[in-house]
Structure formats: C-alpha cells, structure tokens
C-alpha cells in the first residue's frame, strides 16, 4: 500500500505516542519512514525505539516553536532522503495550568502557546515542507472531538483543535492545485503523554467506552492504520476531511 513512499512523522516522544503508532504502520505497509523528535531531551528514547524498525531510519530534530528549526529539518531530509511523499503532524501542547484551571481563567500567554504549537506549527510545516513534497503527496494532522463538543478539562485545547480543523480545510484548498492532499484524523481518547495531562482522563476513557457503539476504546494501531490509508494512493480522492477513528463515539447524541 505504501511501497516506494517516503513519509516523515513528527514528533515521536515515546512508545505511547500516536506518532510512533503511525510510523510503525507506515513501515508495516511498505513505506520508508523519517522520524522527528522535539529536542535533545527526547533523542535517546527515540533512538532506542527506532531500533525496533526493520529499516534504517533518519531521525531529525524539529522544534516547531522555531521556524528556523523546521527549515533545518526540511534541509536535513532533503539532503539525506530527497523529496518525500507526505508528512504527519502529531504535535499539540498547552501549558498545564490551562488544562487544570477553568477555561474562563485561560491566560493570554497560555492561549498563544496552545495556538502556536498545536495549530500554527501545522501551517508553518505545510509551507516549509511544500518544496520537498512530491506530486501527489499527503499531509495529515491529529485532532480530537473536543474541537466540536465540550469535553470537561480539555479547555483551550478544544479551541486549538477547532482552529486546526479549519486550517486543514484552507490548506487543502490552497495545496490542492499541487496535488497535495490535507486531512485530519480525529482519534478517540488514547493513553499518551499529552493525554495524561488532562484532568480526570481515566474518566474520559471509561465514559467513551460505555457510550461508543463498539463499546470499547480504540487502539493506537487503528489510528496508525488509518493514517497509512490516508497517506496511500487508496485515498487519492480525499482531502480537507476529518476522519473519525473513535469506535463511533462521535455519532451519538446521548
């Protein structure tokens, strides 16, 4: 399904990262993966993880708070791999206090940080990576149902994900002429480093499991495999969409 395709995945932090599940799936379906990590703090851990992959894997540092650092990542990939067939943006962050305090108490600084890291970084990466993307190519980002409905304690991240999904549509429109597709995966709750920062996250998991039509929570693998589909030519007619991988939770009214 992904034979001959080279895909960059940003950013892997540990084995529970959705980005890591996506990277594993890309390799499983025959693709070549390039893996990004945020900074030196994560490098050793990621180096250990990639030893599990049955291919030589390029690692690149990509701190999305700095456009210069993104450009360096682009240059390193171009130098070592050449053009690529897409990238995955699995990056989001809000200061802890913004997820612990009431939404009404969100500070301007916390709001700016959440929007810069979780939303603007996707726009910036799309712009800077554009020159090394083949035609066709596919770009994916990760979102969550808290963009549409109130998820207690998700707070400013819900606003950021709403902006991210809108960005997907505008980028899909502008990049379509270059045969670059842009989509988002709205994943159900998964136990990740970022998710653990949300108050009462375990309650969210139980609530989701009880009300989802499939009566279970999703697995990391299911998000990874959906990403592989969107990165492949099998999804050549899909762009500007939010694809739900949530055991059907989003269809429920009560």
Image: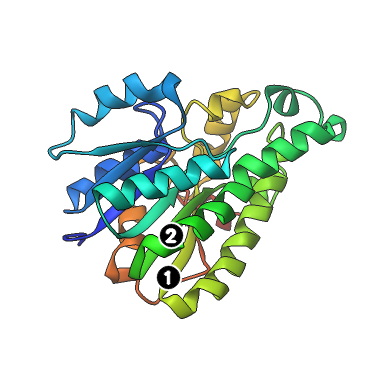
Q: Is residue 104 left or right of residue 184?
A: right
Q: Determine contact: label 2, label 1, CB under 8 Å.
A: yes
Q: Which mark is residue 138?
A: none
Whole-percent x, y for residue 21 in the image:
33, 39
Report which quarter residue 45 is drawn in: top left
- Residue 41 in view (yes/no): yes
- 77 or 3, nearer to the observer: 77
Q: Which mark is residue 139?
A: 2
Q: Is residue 101 left or right of residue 124?
A: right
Whole-percent x, y for residue 86 in the image:
36, 59
Regarding mark 2 in the picture, which secondary structure is present there? strand
> Vertically, is 76 above or below 98?
below
Badge 2 or badge 1: first in the primary sequence: 2
| Residue pictured at 60% horizontal, 24% vertical | 197
> Vertically, is 81 above or below 13?
below
**Outermost bottom residue:** 177
Q: Residues within 10 Å of mark 2 (few under 14, many from 20)?
A: many
- Residue 224 in view (yes/no): no
- Reading the image, the residue beneath label 1 is 180
Q: Residues within 10 Å of mark 1 (few under 14, many from 20)?
A: many
Regarding mark 1 in the picture, which secondary structure is present there? strand
> Vertically, is 236 above or below 108?
below
Q: CA distance from mark 2 to mark 1?
A: 7 Å
The image shows a total of numbered marks equal to: 2
| Residue pictured at 21% horizontal, 53% vertical | 31
> Vertically, is 214 above or below 153?
below
| Residue pictured at 24% horizontal, 31% vertical | 50
Q: Is residue 97 left or right of residue 75?
A: right
Whole-percent x, y for residue 65 in the image:
59, 38
- 128 or 110, nearer to the observer: 128
| Residue pictured at 45% horizontal, 63% vertical | 130
Whole-percent x, y for residue 88 in the image:
41, 50
């Amino acid at each position: 399904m992904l034979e001959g395709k080279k895909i960059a995945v940003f950013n892997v932090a540990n084995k529970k990262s959705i980005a890591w599940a996506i990277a594993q799936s890309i390799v499983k379906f025959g693709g070549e993966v390039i893996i990004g990590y945020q900074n030196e703090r994560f490098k050793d851990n990621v180096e250990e993880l990639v030893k599990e992959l049955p291919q030589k894997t390029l690692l690149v540092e990509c701190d999305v708070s700095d456009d210069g650092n993104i450009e360096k990542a682009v240059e390193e990939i171009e130098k070592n791999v050449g053009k690529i067939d897409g990238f995955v943006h699995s990056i989001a962050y809000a200061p802890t206090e913004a997820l612990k305090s009431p939404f009404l108490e969100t500070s301007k600084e916390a709001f700016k940080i959440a929007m810069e890291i979780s939303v603007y970084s996707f726009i910036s990466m799309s712009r800077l990576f554009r020159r090394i993307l083949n035609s066709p190519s596919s770009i994916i980002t990760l979102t969550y149902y808290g963009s549409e409905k109130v998820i207690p304690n998700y707070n400013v991240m819900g606003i950021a994900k709403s902006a991210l999904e809108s960005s997907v549509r505008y980028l899909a429109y502008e990049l379509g002429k270059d045969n670059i597709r842009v989509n988002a995966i709205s994943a159900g709750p998964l136990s990740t480093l970022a998710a653990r920062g949300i108050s009462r996250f375990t309650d969210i998991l139980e609530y989701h499991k009880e009300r989802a039509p499939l009566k279970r929570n999703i697995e990391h693998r299911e998000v990874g495999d959906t990403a592989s589909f969107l990165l492949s030519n099998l999804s050549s007619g899909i762009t500007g969409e939010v694809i739900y991988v949530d055991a059907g939770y989003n269809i429920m009214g009560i």
